[in-house]
Image (spheres, helix red, strand yellow):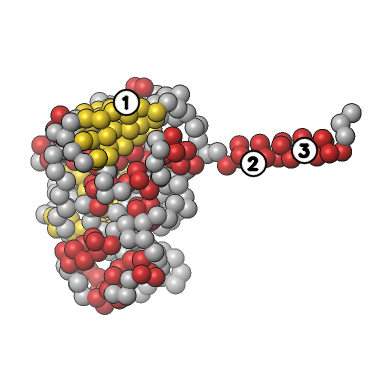
Amino acid sequence: MFSPVKSALLLLCSLSLCSVQGQEKSPVNSSDGPYVIYKGDSILVQQIEQGGQKKEQYLQSNKKAVKLKINFSDAPEKNFEVKLRQNIINEPSTWNQPKKMLVLSDIKGEFDALRDLLIANKVINKKYEWIFGDGHLVICGDLFDRGTEVPATMWLLYKLEEEAKLKGGYVHTILGNHDIMNLAGNFKYVDQKYFLNAEKLNLSYADLYSEKTELGRWLRSKNLIEKIGDNLCMHGGISPDVNDLGLTIEKLNEIARPYIGWKNLKNTVTDSTILKIFNSKDGIFWFRGYFKEPVVDEKIVDQTLSLFQVKRIIVGHTIVKTNVGFYYNKKVLGVDVNQHKGDHQAALFENNKWYKVGLTGNKILL
């Protein structure tokens, strides 16, 4: 029979073990990366392989010669390769209307959801090859958090961007609130896997997406808002405060870009325009006023449409039971669904009509 002290110690150890197990959201030994980090004239590629082993290699500075392997420890058949591009440039803000367009948002590291949606709707095939022709793929924000395949999701979009251009198509990756949170050091929703793996790589989690990394530079080249034909695409929405700024789409992206990744912005920046754009309630990344009470009046939506010369606003960020769906007399299209909990849907524009699509390939007219 144990003494009272020994019994107490055993109980404490048991509770501690349960606590650690409860906090662990994903297998620690699952693959992660690769992360491409620039070290002077050299390129350092680091990743965690199956079994949790660290792998790193220094490569030549010729980026065109670098081919990355994205591996999945649970399903090797999902593996793919990516070539690094020579240069990363800032995205344009305005586009002509494509004949077809698939729009989704809030992937948040759910690689399988993205992959399956793109395959089901004939954007890519099972070899990850672009088969959408001159169509456009639009991601309305939130690549980070909750899911356990964040880098793989980014690398797939990175890969498809180049392939789409060769076929006359395009991939638009627009930033969301979770993206700017991660770049600015707010890791509230990050899966524990990434902190553990960063430590194995002798890095901090913030280092993985700094301006000295390929993915960090790629993310910082993205816009917070784009006009694609008659559609104003972003993550959150346009509040009355942002309307009142009277800025063009190009100007919004131009003045906001230097502040992407800015830590503690609200306490270190005094420019009222920047503060309104990034405001955690009414800013472009965060606004929920089309769906959450008190919802904005339709005249505010009309003001936005008039200001930016578009017919509709397309947003993610806010999950609504009726998504994917139209609101405000078809002036607002909400595309956020709970990808993290298995609700995999997107909006498809084709033959001048809008459809709700999922994993079956069936189309429901909106």
Mark nearer the viewer, 3 or 2: 3
Q: Position of residue 117 (x, y in %)?
A: 32, 37
Q: Amino acid at mark 2?
A: Ser
Q: Which numbered dot is residue 79?
A: 1
Q: Which numbered dot is residue 274?
A: none
Q: Nearer the viewer, residue 90 or 129?
A: 90
How dense is the environment of label 2, judged by Cα within 10 Å: few (below 14), some, or many (20 and up)?
A: few
* 274 to 172, vertically: above or below: below
Q: Say which residue appears at 26% left-offset and 46% top-offset.
A: 212
* 56 to 184, vertically: above or below: above
Circles 3, 2 touching at the beta carbon (< 8 Å): no
Q: Say which residue appears at 40% left-offset and 55% top-offset.
A: 185
Quadrant for residue 114, please give it.
top left
Lower sequence index among marks 3 and 1: 3
Q: Which numbered dot is residue 19?
A: 2
Q: Nearer the viewer, residue 365 or 60?
A: 60
* 249 to 73, vertically: above or below: below
The secondary structure type at the circle numbered 2 is helix
Looking at the figure, which quarter contains the N terminus? top right
Q: CA distance from mark 3 to mark 1?
A: 46 Å
Q: Position of residue 231 (x, y in %)?
A: 21, 58
How dense is the environment of label 1, judged by Cα within 10 Å: few (below 14), some, or many (20 and up)?
A: some
Quadrant for residue 279, please give it.
bottom left
Q: Say which residue appears at 24% left-offset and 40% top-offset.
A: 39
Lower sequence index among marks 3 and 2: 3
The secondary structure type at the circle numbered 1 is loop
Q: Amino acid at mark 1?
A: Asn
Lower sequence index among marks 2 and 1: 2
Q: Position of residue 274 (x, y in %)?
A: 29, 70
Q: Which residue is mark 3?
A: 9
